[in-house]
Image (cartoon, grey):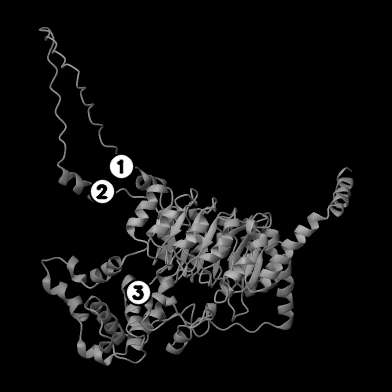
């Protein structure tokens, strides 16, 4: 009975305090203005008063003046994505008031060392990305005061290994990723060019046969077209499934030459002739695998080091369509790989591409209204239901901002439109095996995230009946070997993650045997992790040096009745050269723990 009067009293007092409504109104006005500009400012979660901001859709026009508009909400921003925007060193002064900021993206901006002066006040910053900027070793040391920094990306900046080492000494807990060097890029290609090295010496004729098939043939290279016979097959095998004639994620199509040059939603910068370092095709392929913008996605087949090197060479040679392979003057390090591709082309002129799925029928007006109504209900609880891509009516569900309260009942809201849902992310939500009924109706479902939920074998049995399911993540669930085995009937399944579940490696191998081409990842065992993370044994402590004034102890007289103790063997001290070689041969290894 006391709750009602207390509530009414609170309303009355709120009406008497003129300042509080003014603050709320100012905050709402700032948020509405920012979102109306095309940028996005949304709450981190339904329970949080903090926000995440991204300028992804307006990056080309987002500048210092636009950044200054975040002033009224600066102290409430936890995540800030300014990647590829036009902000400058001076403009980042606006960040000094973002005391709650934990994640900051500045990749591919024009900032330099001066910008990092404004980050010293960000004491809660945990993640920073300055990939593709002008930041150097001198600027990097300005981050030494950020004691909570956990992840720092400095790929393709002016930072050197020496600068990374200096910062690591001051921030030993931070993971600093400086990418691969040019030498690292070359190593896999050179190794791939000599496949006969591992063949037994006793059979030289047999060992030479594979090399002969891929021998560099100047005549064949002069007849082959660089795009049609080299580049197109690579893109067809690794990129066209998501960026093709039918499915064009991010408005990007890579199925023909004209579409590649046209680019996607970010403009004609997918391939920039003679500028591979600025071409998004290469930039995103070289991002760390755990970066959201890495391409292809981490769970899809990746470009090999040789394929990536070939694409770089093609772009830097001018990104021509009909020039011959020979005319582009390939370096010797790539000739064996190019010869292998040309031989495959000769054996199979048509590149193998995933068969195109039937195009779904357009939504009826009744279906559109139904989807709009359900979308509104989900938005009210901070879940998101939206088209899978800008050119399709098929849907994806995400509950990252509603995970704490999103359960089986909330998922059941999608029952009437289940066949239109292709991607579902329920990670960390409250769904259980009782959600199987709704998922069974999603006959076109391709990707499903169930990590860190209370699901297990009950839901797996239903997923085995979904004909289009390609990816499912059971990380941190109660899935067992029995449940995993029921996925054997999901013939389209290609990726299964079962880290920290109850699935064993034997069961994973059994499923892969029944689903050729599928990968079931159960992660590392605790013993393997412990072995990787165990520190190297400490070297023996040197004996204490005798004091200058200390007299040598006189030897005790031997007791004739006692057996003399054996003399201790001196510990041999390795020569400096040998010690250095030993240290180099056994470096300390740190485990790289990634979210699957």
The residue that mark 2 highlights is: 586
Q: Nearer the viewer, residue 31 or 18?
A: 18
* Residue 69 x/y as whole percent: 64, 67
Q: Secondary structure at mark 3?
A: helix
Q: Is residue 464 visible?
A: no
Looking at this view, is 211 or 313 the one in front? 313
Is residue 62 in view? yes
Q: Is residue 321 left or right of residue 573?
A: right
Quarter of the rendering containing residue 362: bottom right
Work out whether 478 lies above or below 341. Answer: above
What residue do we see at 65% from left, 71% from top? 418
Residue 450, image quadrant: bottom right
Q: Name the spot of residue 47 as percent of width and height, x first.
A: 68, 54
Give the image location of residue 525, x and y in percent: 41, 49
The residue that disc 1 covers is 536
Q: N-terminal of the two: label 1 or label 3? A: 3
**Of the residues under marks 3 and 2, which one precedes in the sequence?**
3
- Identify the element where label 2 is drawn: loop
Evaluate if marks 1 and 2 touch, with contact meaning CB atoms under 8 Å apart: yes
How far from the left and from the top, in percent, is residue 343? 26, 83
The mark that comes first in sequence, 1 or 2, is 1
Mark 3 lies on residue? 308
> Helix or strand or loop: what does disc 1 sit on?
loop
Q: Image quadrant for the N terminus?
A: top right
Q: CA distance from mark 1 to mark 2?
A: 9 Å
The vertical placement of 296 against 161, above or below, is below
């Amino acid at each position: 009975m006391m709750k009602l009067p207390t509530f009414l009293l609170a309303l009355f007092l709120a009406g008497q305090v003129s300042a509080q409504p003014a603050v709320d109104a100012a905050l709402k006005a700032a948020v509405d203005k920012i979102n109306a500009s095309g940028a996005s400012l949304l709450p981190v979660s339904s329970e949080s008063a903090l926000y995440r901001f991204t300028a992804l859709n307006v990056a080309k026009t987002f500048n210092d003046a636009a950044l200054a508009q975040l002033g009224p909400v600066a102290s409430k921003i936890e995540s800030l994505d300014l990647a590829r925007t036009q902000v400058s060193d001076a403009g980042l002064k606006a960040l000094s008031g973002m005391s709650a900021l934990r994640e900051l993206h500045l990749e591919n901006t024009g900032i330099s060392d001066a910008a990092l002066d404004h980050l010293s006040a960000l004491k809660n910053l945990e993640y920073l990305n300055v990939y593709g900027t002008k930041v150097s070793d001198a600027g990097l040391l300005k981050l030494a005061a950020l004691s909570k920094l956990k992840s720092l990306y400095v790929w393709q900046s002016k930072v050197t290994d020496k600068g990374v080492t200096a910062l690591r000494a001051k921030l030993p807990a931070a993971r600093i990723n400086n990418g691969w060097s040019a030498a690292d890029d070359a190593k896999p290609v050179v190794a791939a060019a000599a496949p006969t090295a591992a063949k037994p010496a006793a059979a030289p004729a047999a060992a030479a046969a594979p090399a002969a098939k891929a021998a560099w043939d100047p005549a064949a290279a002069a007849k082959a077209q660089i795009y049609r016979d080299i580049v197109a097959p690579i893109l067809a095998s690794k990129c066209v499934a998501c960026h093709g004639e039918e499915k064009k994620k991010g408005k990007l199509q890579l199925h023909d030459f004209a579409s590649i040059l046209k680019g996607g939603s970010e403009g004609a910068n997918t391939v920039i002739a003679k500028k591979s370092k600025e071409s998004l095709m290469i930039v995103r392929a070289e991002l760390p695998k755990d970066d959201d913008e890495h391409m292809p996605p981490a769970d899809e087949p990746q470009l090999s080091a040789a394929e990536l090197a070939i694409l770089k060479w093609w772009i830097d040679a001018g990104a021509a369509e009909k020039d011959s392979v020979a005319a582009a003057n390939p370096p010797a390090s790539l000739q064996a790989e190019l010869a292998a591709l040309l031989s495959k082309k000769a054996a199979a002129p048509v590149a193998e591409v995933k068969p195109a799925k039937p195009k779904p029928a357009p939504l009826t007006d009744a279906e559109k209204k139904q989807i709009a109504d359900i979308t509104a209900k989900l938005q009210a609880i901070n879940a998101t239901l939206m088209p899978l891509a800008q050119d399709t009516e098929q849907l994806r569900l995400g509950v990252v901002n509603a995970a704490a309260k999103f359960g089986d009942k909330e998922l059941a809201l999608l029952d009437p439109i289940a066949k239109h849902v292709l991607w579902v992310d329920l990670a960390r939500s409250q769904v259980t095996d009782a959600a199987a009924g709704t998922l069974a109706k999603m006959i076109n479902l391709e990707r499903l995230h169930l990590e860190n939920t209370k699901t297990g074998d009950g839901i797996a049995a239903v997923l085995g009946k979904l004909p289009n399911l390609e990816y499912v993540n059971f990380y941190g669930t109660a899935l067992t070997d029995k449940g995993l085995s029921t996925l054997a009937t999901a013939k389209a399944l290609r990726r299964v993650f079962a880290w920290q579940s109850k699935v064993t490696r034997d069961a994973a191998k059994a499923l892969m045997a029944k689903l050729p081409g599928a990968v079931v990842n159960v992660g590392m065992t605790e013993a393997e992790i412990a072995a990787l993370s165990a520190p190297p044994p400490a070297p023996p402590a040197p004996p204490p040096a005798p004091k200058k004034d200390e007299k040598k102890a006189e030897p005790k007289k031997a007791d004739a009745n006692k057996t003399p103790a054996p003399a201790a063997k001196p510990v041999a001290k390795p020569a400096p050269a040998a010690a250095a070689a030993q240290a180099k041969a056994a470096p300390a290894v740190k485990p790289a723990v990634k979210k699957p």
